[in-house]
Image: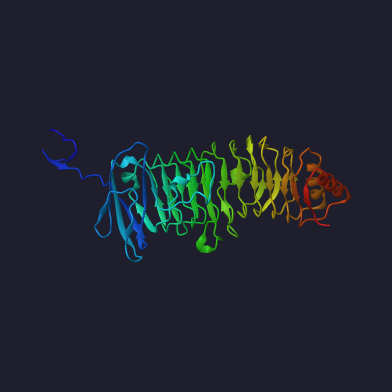
């Protein structure tokens, strides 16, 4: 019996039934009066591009513009042959909104086009590297199996409530600032470098809980989780209690994330420059496992945490410290002032307002710091 390529062989003598063709169409639900996406191909790639719009007209352009007349839900379709030629799908992006070392460059800047759904990426764009949906109206994204996907930009994609990253092993950067997510699972993202999830739960006024799950954090340099208001961020206890090392971390910003426990970051790589962890409900600070960067402005901001203990060992070069409204005892206020005064740093800022006033010894440290160009805020 002969199996003809492109056919399927079933039970039954001589039964040869053609396999159905693979559907390589990407389906997009647009919602605006205008539909103006942008398609980017891999460098050097040539491909046949066919857009089929809701009114049955077509286009071969990488940057089609369709005047639909009025805002309404419409189904648009994209088919590229070969589908592997697609490098990026762009429904909105502005590189000025949330940058970083690996953010998408300004050459991709594009006015948002309203879409509420995007499906078929696995067969329609299997080598997709960038998905840009900032300010779009998409509610969910199934990105599973996109093993070449590196970057997702979804800044202020407010209705976005779910994302599937299963199998996205090449993922380097995600930006979900001002969205409606309650969980982001990046455990398969073994190359992740940059995670930006500030302000989740827009439908709840940023008061909902949010869970972030990370796997390999060897390459992680930026982690932002701020502005959860009264909601709580979970899934990262091992990060903040020091059980998981962050050898490449430069910036860690969980302000208003209401995490709790002891802040005992394990940052052994000598890369850390900035901690913004105000309003996190930490009860103690232990810096003994941090190796700070040798250059640059070093920041340790932990205001609004109910701190009962502080250990600044290893923070000799940190000249910018904020511990306002932490309920610090006079002994802790004096300790912070004395620790920094004993170092050689100059021109920094120390903020200890909203705590017990320093003792006479503490005020002596204030004078020492001011003599080295520090701005010092304490209660009197």
The residue under the point 48% across, 44% down is 105
Quarter location, residue 379: bottom right
The residue under the point 45% across, 44% down is 151
Q: Give whichever of 368, 329 is nearer the camera.
A: 368
How many discs appear?
0
Residue that sits furthest to the left in the current view: 14
Quarter location, residue 220: top right
Q: Is residue 33 above or below residue 285?
A: below
Q: Give whichever of 147, 341 is nearer the camera.
A: 341
Q: Position of residue 125 (x, y in %)?
A: 34, 44
Q: Position of residue 138 (x, y in %)?
A: 41, 57
Model colouring: rainbow
Residue that sits furthest to the right in the current view: 360
Q: Position of residue 82 (x, y in %)?
A: 28, 40
35 to the left or right of 241: left
Which quadrant is the C terminus positioned in?
A: bottom right
Q: Is residue 149 above or below residue 163?
A: above
Q: Give whichever of 312, 309 is nearer the camera.
A: 312
Q: Is residue 95 above or below residue 317?
A: below
1 to the left or right of 34: left
Q: Is residue 228 above or below residue 371?
A: below
Which quadrant is the N terminus positioned in?
A: top left
380 to the left or right of 16: right
Residue that sits furthest to the bottom in the current view: 70
The residue under the point 31% across, 46% down is 124
Q: Position of residue 337 (x, y in %)?
A: 80, 46
């Amino acid at each position: 019996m002969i199996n003809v390529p492109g056919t399927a062989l079933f039970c039954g003598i001589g039964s040869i039934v053609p396999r159905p063709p693979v559907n390589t169409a990407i389906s997009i639900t647009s919602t605006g009066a205008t539909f103006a996406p942008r398609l980017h191909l891999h460098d050097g790639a040539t491909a046949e591009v066919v857009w089929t719009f809701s009114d049955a007209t077509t286009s071969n352009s990488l940057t089609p513009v369709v005047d639909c007349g009025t805002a309404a839900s419409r189904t648009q379709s994209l088919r590229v042959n070969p589908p592997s030629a697609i490098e990026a799908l762009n429904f909105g992006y502005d590189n000025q909104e949330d940058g970083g070392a690996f953010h998408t460059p300004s050459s991709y800047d594009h006015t948002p086009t309203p879409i509420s759904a995007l499906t078929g990426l696995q067969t329609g764009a299997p080598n997709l590297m960038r998905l840009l949906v900032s300010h779009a109206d998409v509610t969910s994204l199934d990105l599973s199996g996109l093993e070449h996907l590196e970057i997702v930009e979804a800044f202020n994609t407010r209705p976005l409530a779910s994302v599937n990253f299963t199998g996205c092993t090449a993922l380097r950067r995600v930006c979900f600032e001002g969205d409606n997510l309650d969980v982001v699972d990046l455990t398969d993202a073994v190359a992740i470098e940059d995670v930006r999830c500030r302000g989740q739960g827009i439908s709840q006024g940023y008061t909902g809980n949010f869970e972030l799950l990370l796997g390999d954090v060897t390459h992680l340099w930026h982690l932002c989780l701020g502005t959860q208001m009264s909601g709580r961020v979970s899934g990262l206890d091992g990060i903040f209690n020091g059980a998981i090392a962050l050898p490449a971390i430069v910036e860690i910003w969980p302000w208003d994330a209401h995490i709790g426990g002891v802040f005992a970051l394990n940052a052994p790589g000598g890369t850390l420059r900035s901690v913004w962890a105000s309003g996190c409900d930490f009860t103690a600070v232990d810096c003994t496992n941090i190796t700070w960067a040798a250059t640059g402005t070093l920041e340790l901001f932990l205001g609004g945490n109910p701190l009962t203990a502080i250990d600044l060992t290893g923070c000799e070069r940190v000249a910018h410290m904020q511990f306002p409204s932490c309920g610090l005892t006079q002994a802790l206020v004096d300790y912070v002032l004395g620790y920094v005064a004993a170092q050689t740093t100059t021109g920094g800022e120390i903020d200890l307002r909203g705590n017990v006033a320093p003792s006479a010894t503490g005020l002596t440290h204030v004078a020492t710091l001011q003599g080295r160009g520090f701005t010092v805020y304490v209660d009197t």
